[in-house]
Image (tube, grey):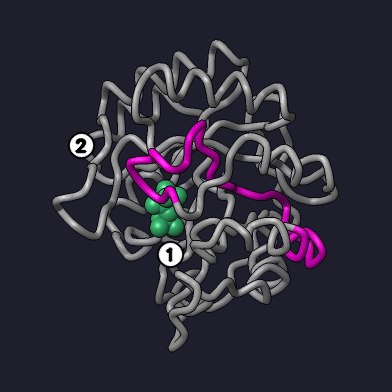
Amino acid sequence: MGNKVIINGGKTIVKVRNINIGGDNPPVFIAGPCSVESREQILKAAVTLKEIGVDILRGGVFKPRTSPHDFQGLGIQGLEYLKEAGEAAGLPIITELMDEKHLKIVAEYVDIIQIGSRNMYNYSLLKAVGRLNMPILLKRGMSATINEWIQAIEYITLNGNENIILCERGIRSFDNYTRNTLDLAAVPIMHKETGLPIIVDPSHGTGIKELVKPMSKAALACGANGLMIEVHPNPKQALCDGDQSLTFTEYREIREEI
Ligand code: PEP
Ligand code: MN
């Protein structure tokens, strides 16, 4: 079992357009709604977040919802809206890929492909993105050990793609006060074990909007290379993850304090 994968001598820098992620580069700020809900919503988010100082726009279009009755995302139409919004604001974009059948179009539209927590164990999907030559954001499985996460990375690297950004997004624990337990020790651990850049998602990591700011600061204090935070023009009306989503004003506060 190869439990240690040191890539590029432990100093991987992932390039997304003119942004360098990892190493001694400044932290990268990824933000946007959980889901793309409409053209207006994502355009508004893109333009406002750009003005606040975000580097990369996020927005889910294929949503891995626990309940099949919940909003599943706008699919390809959402991808079109996300691309238009990114272009309007001059921001690179990231979205989650759930199914290999959408790989080609997602790779064509976005700057970074996100592999979500639920798909960290989807080895055929990992192999497929491993055959691409573009940045992949690999989230930690919600019950994944460090070693399982490292082996998921290897499914990508062994197929040729070393443009990997890791994302700690919290793991399941006995405590359900928070949605997940944000494992910040994973940040220095993964730096040491892989040399890959790692960002933190305090939104899914806690599920509570009030915790996003303190956990963002803690993440950067322990060396995270960036933050991915859910921000919505109107969190109370969000179709997904409204409780953990920040308003623009709340996000601006974090961005300015950091
Ligand atoms: C997301 O970032 O939109 C998401 C679904 O996160 P996770 O895969 O970490 O649950
Ligand atoms: Mn979400």
Residue 5 x, y percent position in the rendering: 59, 68
Cα distance, mark 2 to mark 1? 20 Å
Determine the residue positioned at 78% across, 67% down. 222
Q: Check the image and name the residue furthest to the left.
A: 69
Residue type, numbered disc 2:
Lys
Residue denoted by label 1:
152
Determine the residue positioned at 83% across, 48% down. 258
Residue 104 x, y percent position in the rendering: 30, 29
Determine the residue positioned at 46% across, 27% down. 110
Most foreground residue, 255 or 250: 250
Residue 241 x, y percent position in the rendering: 41, 51
Q: Is residue 33 left or right of residue 128?
A: right
As drawn, 245 above or below 209: above
Most foreground residue, 107 or 216: 216
**Is 52 covered by the magenta stretch?**
no
Residue 165 x, y percent position in the rendering: 59, 50
**Is 219 covered by the magenta stretch?**
yes
Residue denoted by label 2:
101
Report whether residue 92 is seen: yes
Residue type, numbered disc 1:
Ala
As drawn, 18 above or below 4: above
Q: Which residues are magenta?
A: 217-242
SS of the residue at dot 1? helix
